[in-house]
Image (cartoon, helix red, strand yellow):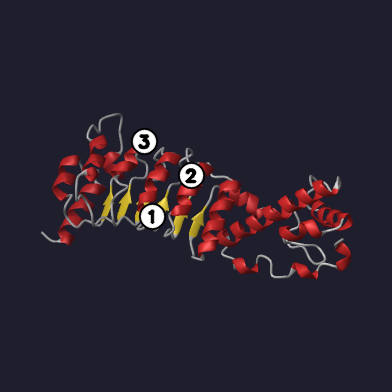
Amino acid sequence: MDLLDHQRIVDVLASDGNLNSRVLNILRMSEVECLDLTASMTDEEGLNLDARELLHVFSKPNSFIFLNEMNLSGVRLSDTDVLHIHHLPRLSRLWISNTGIGNEAIFYLVSLKRSLTELDIAFNTGISDDAVPALILMHKLRFLTLLDTSIEMPGLRRLCAAITSRRHLIELEVPRECELYIEKLGKKYLVQPEAPLITDPHVVRDLSIAALKRNLSAHAEYNHAILAEGSREEMADRLTTLLETRQADLIVRSILWKDDVTMVDDKDDDDYDSDDVF
């Protein structure tokens, strides 16, 4: 029986939810490349008694070593269930949305960093910013969906900064709250300051008190919560934080909107007036 026959058998049984541990044991050393376990592992009123045994087959030696795509979306999983599949050497596309997994599961998946290119972990609210260090290590990802997770802007900024540093393209889907934040950047601060206003947080400490007030006042016109007063140190800290946040936000926007990240700041802060410094 050739590869195509094995794959056809698996596809037919999977579509009807008839894959069980016995069938998987028979096929575990075949060259099956795609496996959809959603229908077979769905627990309908507790009647699918074999569902929890299916994943154990993958822990057996040389099981499904040719598998490159796996769908477990909608299946209730614990974080440790991921240990049964985290060693599959060719797994490239993994769909585990709405499974109830949390941050721990994402760290287990780091062992797939050499093969994983597509990952769907949407609708898992237990996944938060704490999982971002693990996601950063998955350097071959070209598609990642974080829809309806608990990832927030601090984690997303960190993730996008790492993606940009590697200079590769990725299709990224993020929680709606993060999308709304990016869409409303113009209400957070002045998005594109013009000289003599600055954009580089590293030159803030060179500014005079008057220049600090001028920069903060320009941003305060777009966000009245920004204060343009205080001691020089307070204003410098405030402006530095604002500009660092702005830079990180624009990197996130460049990935989500597919802008050219090199155009985030296309002017030189050497253009600020000499009167702005001591």
**Is residue 76 shown to the viewer in this render?**
no
- Foreground residue among 130 and 22: 130
Circles 1 and 3, Cβ within 8 Å, touching? The answer is no
Instruction: Indicate which disc, 2 or 3, sits on the residue closer to the N terminus.
Output: 3
Percent of width and height locating residue 69: 31, 55
Outermost residue toward the front in this view? 278
Amino acid type shown at disc 2: Ala
Amino acid type shown at disc 1: Lys
Instruction: Indicate which disc, 2 or 1, sits on the residue closer to the N terminus.
Output: 1
Which residue is at a point 59% across and 62% down the rendered structure image?
254
Q: How far apart are marks 1 and 3 (CA)?
A: 21 Å
Q: Residues within 10 Å of mark 3 (few under 14, many from 20)?
A: some
**Is residue 136 shown to the viewer in this render?**
yes
Residue picked out by circle 3: 78
Residue picked out by circle 1: 113
Outermost residue toward the top in this view? 46
State the quadrant of the N terminus: bottom left
- SS of the residue under disc 1: loop
Q: Distance between the residues labelled 2 and 1?
A: 14 Å
- SS of the residue under disc 2: helix
Amino acid type shown at disc 3: Ser
Q: In this view, does 157 lie above or below 104?
A: below
Percent of width and height locating residue 252: 59, 57
Q: Which of marks 2 and 3 is in front?
A: 2
Circles 2 and 1, Cβ within 8 Å, touching? The answer is no
Instruction: Indicate which disc, 1 or 3, sits on the residue closer to the N terminus.
Output: 3
Q: Residues within 10 Å of mark 2 (few under 14, many from 20)?
A: many
Q: Nearer the viewer, mark 1 or mark 3?
A: 1
Q: In this view, does 110 lie to the left or right of 59?
A: right
Percent of width and height locating residue 99: 39, 40
- Figure quadrant of residue 272: bottom right
Residue picked out by circle 2: 131
